[in-house]
Image (cartoon, rainbow, N blue to C red):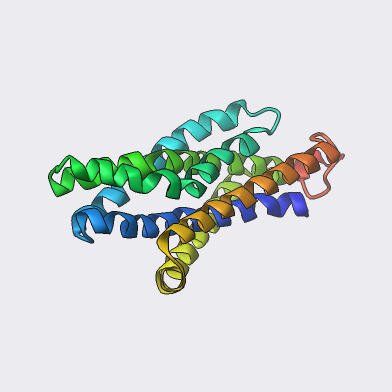
Amino acid sequence: MIRRQMPYLIAFISGFAMMAYEILGVRVLSPYFGGTIYVWGAIIAVFLTGLGIGYALGGRMADKDVNGTALRNLLPVPAAAIMLFPLYGHRICRLIHSWELDSRLGALLLSINLFLLPCIFIGMLMPVLVRLQAETTGKVGSASGNIYAVSTAGSITGTLFTSFFLIAWLPVSTNIMLTGSLLALCWLAALAYSHLKVVDPAGQLDESRPDQRQH
């Protein structure tokens, strides 16, 4: 039961963290380029680009992940990048702003530098989670639909909770660090998942999977 629910937990939290980071990203760019439609458009475009690249790369990684280690190897990168954002984020903002670029180009360039890499790695998580869930249930279609549905639910929750509450409660830098901490918790969950997979190795009879029942 725990093994079956773990991918859903990680999908929900990573979806929450991604959208929280996106909302907070607008607040980061606002002092430099304002809260204009250019800033929103640049951030949304970069996040979608990162996720698209991540889905493609993650699918290839999932096909090759015979040992089930991809999940725990992927998570530390976005977790560290977001948690450490206060150490480098505002320096990059000041640097690019000092170039006095057109606001559209400046917002896009800044968004690429700040947000693209974490989004790629968060996107890579999804196909890996789908494969892990499919291995548990034996149903690829259901696993795919359920993982993406849970991730979307996390994204909706992250959007509303960050917009309605977090921004009013805490400074932006603190909220970004907390967002990264959520992904660090996902990494710990991935380590626990790997341990459970060793304790209950693939190939052991699972009565919930019709393809493993003896006839």
| Figure quadrant of the N terminus | bottom right
Q: Is residue 146 visible?
A: no
Count of marks placed on residues? 0
Percent across and percent down for residue 142 are 60, 50
Q: Quadrant of residue 53?
A: top left
Residue at figure coordinates x 14%, y 42% from the top left: 101
Relative horizontal placement of residue 124, taking residue 8 as reference (left or right): left
Give the vertical position of 215 relative to 39 (above or below).
Answer: above
Give the vertical position of 175 relative to 115 (above or below).
Answer: below
Q: Which of the two residues, 192 or 93, is positioned nearer the viewer here?
A: 93
Residue at figure coordinates x 59%, y 29% from the top left: 63
Q: Is residue 28 visible?
A: yes
Residue at figure coordinates x 14%, y 43% from the top left: 100
Relative horizontal placement of residue 191, taking residue 128 as reference (left or right): right
Percent across and percent down for residue 6 are 69, 51
Give the vertical position of 106 relative to 31 (above or below).
Answer: above
Q: Which of the two residues, 20 or 114, is positioned nearer the viewer here?
A: 114
Percent across and percent down for residue 68 are 69, 33
Q: Which of the two residues, 73 or 199, is positioned nearer the viewer here?
A: 73
Percent across and percent down for residue 42 are 26, 48
| Figure quadrant of the C terminus | top right
Q: Quadrant of residue 23?
A: bottom left
